[in-house]
Amino acid sequence: MSRIFAISDLHVDYGQNWAVVNDWSDTDYNNDVLILAGDVTDSLELLKSTLILLRQKFAQVCFVPGNHDVWVRKHRDGDTNSIAKFGQILNLCQRIGIKTKPTCVSCIDNSKVWLVPIYSWYTQPEEDEIDSLYFPSSIESRRMSREIWSDNYNCKWPDGMLTTISEHFADLNDDFITDDYDAPVITFSHFLPRQELIASSHDDDVAVSTEREFLGLPKLDYAKRQGALAGFNFSIYAGSKYIDKQLRQCKSVLHVFGHQHRNRDRVIDNVRYVSHCLGYHKERQDGLLWGLRQWQNGPKMIWPVPTKDEAKKRKTTDAQLGNALPRCSQKFMRTPSDGKNANEYQSVGRSIM
Ligand SMILES: [Fe+2]
Protein backbone atom coordinates (compact mmCIF):
# COMPACT_ATOMS: atom_id res chain seq x y z
CA MET A 1 0.00 0.00 0.00
CA SER A 2 1.68 3.13 -1.26
CA ARG A 3 1.68 6.87 -1.44
CA ILE A 4 2.70 8.45 -4.75
CA PHE A 5 5.50 11.04 -4.78
CA ALA A 6 6.83 13.08 -7.70
CA ILE A 7 9.93 15.06 -8.62
CA SER A 8 11.97 15.88 -11.74
CA ASP A 9 15.16 17.53 -12.92
CA LEU A 10 17.51 16.02 -10.35
CA HIS A 11 20.59 16.96 -12.44
CA VAL A 12 22.83 14.83 -10.25
CA ASP A 13 25.89 15.67 -12.40
CA TYR A 14 26.15 18.54 -9.94
CA GLY A 15 27.61 17.39 -6.62
CA GLN A 16 25.21 19.52 -4.58
CA ASN A 17 22.25 17.84 -6.26
CA TRP A 18 23.71 14.37 -5.83
CA ALA A 19 24.14 15.11 -2.12
CA VAL A 20 20.51 16.26 -1.84
CA VAL A 21 19.19 13.06 -3.43
CA ASN A 22 21.56 10.85 -1.44
CA ASP A 23 20.26 12.52 1.74
CA TRP A 24 16.63 11.61 1.13
CA SER A 25 15.45 9.24 3.83
CA ASP A 26 16.34 5.57 3.46
CA THR A 27 13.27 4.53 5.45
CA ASP A 28 10.41 7.03 4.99
CA TYR A 29 9.50 5.94 1.46
CA ASN A 30 9.99 2.20 1.63
CA ASN A 31 6.36 1.45 0.72
CA ASP A 32 5.97 4.36 -1.68
CA VAL A 33 6.21 4.98 -5.40
CA LEU A 34 8.31 7.73 -6.99
CA ILE A 35 7.45 9.34 -10.32
CA LEU A 36 10.69 10.71 -11.73
CA ALA A 37 9.90 13.00 -14.65
CA GLY A 38 13.24 13.21 -16.45
CA ASP A 39 16.57 15.06 -16.51
CA VAL A 40 18.66 13.02 -14.11
CA THR A 41 22.01 13.10 -15.95
CA ASP A 42 23.47 12.58 -19.43
CA SER A 43 25.84 9.92 -18.08
CA LEU A 44 24.39 6.40 -18.38
CA GLU A 45 26.70 5.24 -15.60
CA LEU A 46 25.52 7.95 -13.20
CA LEU A 47 21.92 7.41 -14.26
CA LYS A 48 22.27 3.76 -13.34
CA SER A 49 23.71 4.47 -9.90
CA THR A 50 21.08 7.16 -9.21
CA LEU A 51 18.19 4.91 -10.22
CA ILE A 52 19.59 2.06 -8.10
CA LEU A 53 19.88 4.44 -5.14
CA LEU A 54 16.26 5.55 -5.60
CA ARG A 55 15.12 1.97 -6.03
CA GLN A 56 16.59 1.26 -2.58
CA LYS A 57 14.67 4.16 -1.03
CA PHE A 58 11.29 3.59 -2.77
CA ALA A 59 9.19 0.49 -3.38
CA GLN A 60 8.96 1.42 -7.06
CA VAL A 61 10.37 4.11 -9.33
CA CYS A 62 8.59 5.16 -12.56
CA PHE A 63 10.76 7.14 -14.99
CA VAL A 64 10.60 9.01 -18.31
CA PRO A 65 13.84 10.40 -19.80
CA GLY A 66 14.26 14.15 -20.36
CA ASN A 67 16.34 16.10 -22.84
CA HIS A 68 19.51 16.04 -20.71
CA ASP A 69 19.30 12.27 -20.35
CA VAL A 70 19.63 11.77 -24.12
CA TRP A 71 22.53 14.15 -24.68
CA VAL A 72 25.37 12.38 -26.46
CA ARG A 73 29.06 13.15 -26.02
CA LYS A 74 31.33 11.86 -28.74
CA HIS A 75 34.23 11.07 -26.40
CA ARG A 76 31.95 8.92 -24.23
CA ASP A 77 28.99 7.82 -26.37
CA GLY A 78 30.77 7.48 -29.74
CA ASP A 79 28.61 7.90 -32.82
CA THR A 80 25.32 7.03 -31.17
CA ASN A 81 22.37 9.39 -31.52
CA SER A 82 19.80 10.61 -29.02
CA ILE A 83 17.10 8.19 -30.15
CA ALA A 84 19.49 5.25 -29.75
CA LYS A 85 20.46 6.59 -26.32
CA PHE A 86 16.80 6.79 -25.37
CA GLY A 87 16.58 3.06 -26.20
CA GLN A 88 19.68 2.35 -24.11
CA ILE A 89 18.06 4.12 -21.16
CA LEU A 90 14.86 2.05 -21.45
CA ASN A 91 16.96 -1.14 -21.59
CA LEU A 92 18.89 -0.04 -18.52
CA CYS A 93 15.63 0.63 -16.67
CA GLN A 94 14.33 -2.81 -17.55
CA ARG A 95 17.51 -4.46 -16.26
CA ILE A 96 17.44 -2.70 -12.88
CA GLY A 97 13.69 -2.78 -12.20
CA ILE A 98 12.70 0.80 -13.03
CA LYS A 99 9.20 1.13 -14.51
CA THR A 100 8.91 2.78 -17.93
CA LYS A 101 5.51 1.33 -18.85
CA PRO A 102 2.03 1.75 -17.29
CA THR A 103 2.00 0.50 -13.72
CA CYS A 104 -0.95 -0.16 -11.42
CA VAL A 105 -0.39 0.77 -7.77
CA SER A 106 -2.40 -0.10 -4.65
CA CYS A 107 -2.58 2.98 -2.45
CA ILE A 108 -2.73 3.46 1.29
CA ASP A 109 -6.41 4.44 1.09
CA ASN A 110 -7.17 1.06 -0.49
CA SER A 111 -7.72 2.67 -3.89
CA LYS A 112 -5.88 1.76 -7.08
CA VAL A 113 -4.22 4.15 -9.49
CA TRP A 114 -2.50 3.73 -12.86
CA LEU A 115 0.78 5.55 -13.49
CA VAL A 116 1.21 6.04 -17.23
CA PRO A 117 4.39 7.47 -18.85
CA ILE A 118 4.08 9.80 -21.82
CA TYR A 119 7.29 9.95 -23.81
CA SER A 120 7.69 13.33 -25.41
CA TRP A 121 9.82 16.10 -26.85
CA TYR A 122 9.24 19.79 -27.58
CA THR A 123 8.02 21.08 -30.90
CA GLN A 124 9.75 24.21 -32.13
CA PRO A 125 7.57 26.72 -34.00
CA GLU A 126 9.58 26.19 -37.21
CA GLU A 127 8.73 22.49 -37.09
CA ASP A 128 4.98 22.76 -36.44
CA GLU A 129 3.48 26.06 -35.46
CA ILE A 130 0.22 24.48 -34.32
CA ASP A 131 1.73 21.84 -32.03
CA SER A 132 4.43 24.11 -30.58
CA LEU A 133 3.87 25.84 -27.23
CA TYR A 134 5.76 28.88 -28.54
CA PHE A 135 4.44 32.35 -27.98
CA PRO A 136 6.27 35.44 -29.18
CA SER A 137 7.73 37.95 -26.80
CA SER A 138 8.55 41.56 -27.54
CA ILE A 139 11.95 41.19 -25.88
CA GLU A 140 13.02 37.86 -27.37
CA SER A 141 16.07 37.27 -29.49
CA ARG A 142 15.61 34.13 -31.60
CA ARG A 143 19.32 34.04 -32.38
CA MET A 144 20.32 34.28 -28.73
CA SER A 145 17.68 31.70 -27.76
CA ARG A 146 19.06 29.27 -30.34
CA GLU A 147 22.69 29.86 -29.38
CA ILE A 148 22.31 29.32 -25.66
CA TRP A 149 20.00 26.29 -25.80
CA SER A 150 22.32 23.41 -24.99
CA ASP A 151 20.26 20.72 -26.76
CA ASN A 152 21.23 22.39 -30.01
CA TYR A 153 24.79 21.16 -29.39
CA ASN A 154 24.27 18.00 -27.34
CA CYS A 155 21.35 16.19 -28.96
CA LYS A 156 22.03 14.26 -32.17
CA TRP A 157 19.19 13.04 -34.35
CA PRO A 158 19.32 10.43 -37.11
CA ASP A 159 19.42 11.67 -40.68
CA GLY A 160 16.24 11.40 -42.70
CA MET A 161 13.69 11.35 -39.87
CA LEU A 162 10.23 11.27 -41.44
CA THR A 163 8.47 12.93 -38.52
CA THR A 164 9.20 15.72 -36.08
CA ILE A 165 11.01 14.60 -32.94
CA SER A 166 7.81 15.22 -30.95
CA GLU A 167 5.83 12.98 -33.28
CA HIS A 168 8.48 10.29 -33.02
CA PHE A 169 8.20 10.16 -29.22
CA ALA A 170 4.41 10.57 -29.20
CA ASP A 171 4.12 7.55 -31.49
CA LEU A 172 5.98 5.44 -28.91
CA ASN A 173 3.03 5.93 -26.55
CA ASP A 174 0.50 4.27 -28.85
CA ASP A 175 0.24 1.14 -26.70
CA PHE A 176 -0.28 3.20 -23.51
CA ILE A 177 -2.88 5.65 -24.80
CA THR A 178 -6.26 4.16 -24.04
CA ASP A 179 -9.25 5.06 -21.91
CA ASP A 180 -9.55 1.43 -20.78
CA TYR A 181 -7.68 1.83 -17.48
CA ASP A 182 -9.81 0.46 -14.64
CA ALA A 183 -8.75 3.06 -12.03
CA PRO A 184 -7.80 6.77 -11.96
CA VAL A 185 -4.84 7.57 -14.22
CA ILE A 186 -1.82 9.71 -13.33
CA THR A 187 0.29 10.51 -16.40
CA PHE A 188 3.81 11.94 -16.45
CA SER A 189 6.09 13.48 -19.06
CA HIS A 190 9.29 15.48 -18.93
CA PHE A 191 8.10 18.29 -21.20
CA LEU A 192 5.24 20.73 -20.73
CA PRO A 193 1.83 19.75 -22.07
CA ARG A 194 0.21 23.18 -22.27
CA GLN A 195 1.20 26.72 -23.10
CA GLU A 196 -0.58 28.16 -20.03
CA LEU A 197 1.79 26.31 -17.73
CA ILE A 198 4.82 28.24 -18.98
CA ALA A 199 3.68 31.48 -17.40
CA SER A 200 3.51 31.84 -13.64
CA SER A 201 0.15 32.39 -12.00
CA HIS A 202 -0.44 34.97 -9.29
CA ASP A 203 -0.14 32.15 -6.72
CA ASP A 204 3.22 31.09 -8.20
CA ASP A 205 4.49 34.66 -7.97
CA VAL A 206 3.35 34.96 -4.37
CA ALA A 207 4.98 31.61 -3.51
CA VAL A 208 8.31 32.73 -5.05
CA SER A 209 8.11 36.06 -3.20
CA THR A 210 7.40 34.22 0.05
CA GLU A 211 10.34 31.90 -0.54
CA ARG A 212 12.66 34.82 -1.31
CA GLU A 213 11.48 36.62 1.80
CA PHE A 214 12.26 33.50 3.85
CA LEU A 215 15.75 33.48 2.33
CA GLY A 216 16.23 37.17 3.11
CA LEU A 217 16.18 38.16 -0.57
CA PRO A 218 14.43 41.18 -2.09
CA LYS A 219 11.42 40.78 -4.37
CA LEU A 220 12.22 40.08 -8.02
CA ASP A 221 12.17 43.18 -10.20
CA TYR A 222 9.94 41.51 -12.76
CA ALA A 223 8.00 38.78 -10.98
CA LYS A 224 6.57 37.39 -14.23
CA ARG A 225 10.05 36.79 -15.63
CA GLN A 226 10.86 34.52 -12.67
CA GLY A 227 14.57 35.08 -13.00
CA ALA A 228 14.66 34.37 -16.75
CA LEU A 229 17.41 35.70 -18.95
CA ALA A 230 16.22 38.72 -20.91
CA GLY A 231 15.93 37.80 -24.57
CA PHE A 232 15.71 34.05 -24.08
CA ASN A 233 12.31 32.63 -25.02
CA PHE A 234 11.86 29.28 -23.30
CA SER A 235 8.52 28.66 -25.00
CA ILE A 236 10.42 27.67 -28.19
CA TYR A 237 11.69 24.59 -26.33
CA ALA A 238 8.95 24.04 -23.74
CA GLY A 239 6.84 21.14 -24.92
CA SER A 240 4.18 19.90 -27.24
CA LYS A 241 0.40 19.82 -27.46
CA TYR A 242 0.61 16.09 -28.29
CA ILE A 243 1.25 15.52 -24.60
CA ASP A 244 -2.00 17.10 -23.48
CA LYS A 245 -3.92 15.34 -26.23
CA GLN A 246 -2.53 11.99 -25.13
CA LEU A 247 -3.00 12.49 -21.40
CA ARG A 248 -6.62 13.46 -22.01
CA GLN A 249 -7.13 10.41 -24.22
CA CYS A 250 -6.12 8.40 -21.14
CA LYS A 251 -8.59 10.40 -19.02
CA SER A 252 -5.72 11.41 -16.78
CA VAL A 253 -6.75 13.18 -13.58
CA LEU A 254 -3.25 14.36 -12.67
CA HIS A 255 -0.25 15.05 -14.87
CA VAL A 256 3.32 15.39 -13.59
CA PHE A 257 5.89 17.20 -15.73
CA GLY A 258 9.28 18.90 -15.35
CA HIS A 259 11.79 20.67 -17.61
CA GLN A 260 11.02 24.29 -16.77
CA HIS A 261 12.58 24.44 -13.28
CA ARG A 262 9.67 26.61 -12.18
CA ASN A 263 7.19 24.74 -10.03
CA ARG A 264 3.49 24.56 -10.73
CA ASP A 265 0.38 23.03 -9.16
CA ARG A 266 -2.69 24.05 -11.05
CA VAL A 267 -6.00 22.64 -12.27
CA ILE A 268 -6.89 23.30 -15.91
CA ASP A 269 -10.01 21.85 -17.48
CA ASN A 270 -10.39 19.22 -14.75
CA VAL A 271 -6.80 17.94 -14.84
CA ARG A 272 -4.33 18.80 -12.08
CA TYR A 273 -0.86 19.65 -13.43
CA VAL A 274 2.09 19.36 -11.06
CA SER A 275 5.70 20.32 -11.67
CA HIS A 276 8.04 19.81 -8.72
CA CYS A 277 11.62 20.21 -9.94
CA LEU A 278 14.76 19.96 -7.84
CA GLY A 279 16.49 22.23 -10.37
CA TYR A 280 19.89 23.79 -9.83
CA HIS A 281 21.49 24.87 -6.56
CA LYS A 282 21.53 28.51 -7.65
CA GLU A 283 17.82 28.40 -8.47
CA ARG A 284 17.11 27.04 -4.99
CA GLN A 285 19.36 29.70 -3.45
CA ASP A 286 17.41 32.32 -5.39
CA GLY A 287 14.07 31.01 -4.11
CA LEU A 288 12.80 30.32 -7.62
CA LEU A 289 11.60 26.77 -6.89
CA TRP A 290 8.69 27.22 -4.54
CA GLY A 291 7.47 24.22 -2.57
CA LEU A 292 10.80 22.40 -2.40
CA ARG A 293 11.75 23.54 1.08
CA GLN A 294 8.44 22.32 2.47
CA TRP A 295 9.33 18.85 1.20
CA GLN A 296 12.92 19.05 2.50
CA ASN A 297 14.20 19.29 -1.10
CA GLY A 298 12.64 15.90 -1.70
CA PRO A 299 9.72 14.61 -3.74
CA LYS A 300 6.19 15.94 -3.27
CA MET A 301 3.34 13.67 -2.29
CA ILE A 302 0.65 13.85 -4.96
CA TRP A 303 -1.63 10.90 -4.22
CA PRO A 304 -3.96 9.73 -2.63
CA VAL A 305 -6.23 12.72 -2.65
CA PRO A 306 -7.24 13.64 0.91
CA THR A 307 -10.94 13.87 1.67
CA LYS A 308 -12.34 17.28 2.56
CA ASP A 309 -12.45 16.26 6.22
CA GLU A 310 -8.82 15.15 6.15
CA ALA A 311 -7.81 18.38 4.45
CA LYS A 312 -9.68 20.39 7.08
CA LYS A 313 -7.91 18.54 9.87
CA ARG A 314 -4.53 19.58 8.54
CA LYS A 315 -3.08 22.31 10.70
CA THR A 316 -0.75 23.59 8.02
CA THR A 317 -2.17 25.73 5.26
CA ASP A 318 -2.02 25.10 1.56
CA ALA A 319 0.62 27.77 1.10
CA GLN A 320 2.76 26.43 3.95
CA LEU A 321 2.76 23.05 2.28
CA GLY A 322 3.67 24.52 -1.06
CA ASN A 323 0.17 23.72 -2.36
CA ALA A 324 0.96 20.08 -1.91
CA LEU A 325 -1.98 18.12 -0.63
CA PRO A 326 -5.05 20.28 -0.33
CA ARG A 327 -5.00 21.07 -4.02
CA CYS A 328 -5.44 17.40 -4.81
CA SER A 329 -9.06 17.71 -3.92
CA GLN A 330 -9.51 20.47 -6.49
CA LYS A 331 -9.48 17.85 -9.22
CA PHE A 332 -12.96 16.93 -8.13
CA MET A 333 -14.11 20.51 -7.96
CA ARG A 334 -14.40 20.86 -11.73
CA THR A 335 -12.54 24.14 -11.79
CA PRO A 336 -12.37 25.81 -15.19
CA SER A 337 -9.17 26.76 -16.97
CA ASP A 338 -7.41 29.59 -15.19
CA GLY A 339 -8.24 31.63 -18.28
CA LYS A 340 -4.87 33.30 -18.50
CA ASN A 341 -3.42 33.90 -21.89
CA ALA A 342 0.24 33.00 -22.04
CA ASN A 343 0.83 35.98 -24.30
CA GLU A 344 0.08 38.25 -21.39
CA TYR A 345 3.42 37.34 -19.94
CA GLN A 346 7.02 37.82 -20.77
CA SER A 347 8.92 34.77 -21.91
CA VAL A 348 10.28 32.59 -19.16
CA GLY A 349 13.33 30.44 -19.29
CA ARG A 350 17.01 29.94 -19.09
CA SER A 351 19.75 28.49 -21.15
CA ILE A 352 20.24 25.14 -19.54
CA MET A 353 16.99 23.39 -18.79
FE1 LIG B 1 14.63 19.32 -19.41
Image: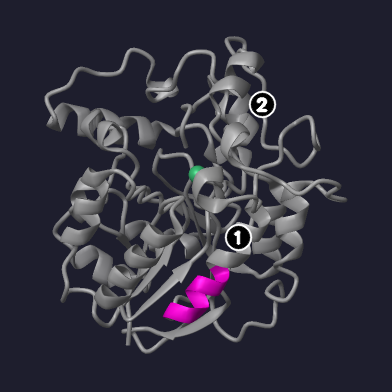
Foreground residue among 85 and 7: 85
Q: Is residue 93 magenta?
A: yes
Foreground residue among 180 and 100: 100
Residue type at mark 2: give it.
Phe
Q: Residues within 10 Å of mark 1 (few under 14, many from 20)?
A: some
In the image, what residue occupies the spot 31% across and 69% down? 54
- Work out whether 341 lies above or below 271: above
| Residue named by callout 1 | 86
- Please identify the quarter of the rendering in which residue 55 is found: bottom left
Say whether residue 313 is left or right of residue 148. left
| Residue named by callout 2 | 135
N-terminal of the pair, mark 2 or mark 1, is 1
> Which contiguous range is marked in magenta?
90-96
Q: Main secondary structure of the magenta part?
A: helix
The CA distance from mark 2 to mark 1 is 29 Å
Say whether residue 140 is left or right of residue 284. right
In the image, what residue occupies the spot 11% across and 24% down? 216
Mark 1 residue element: helix
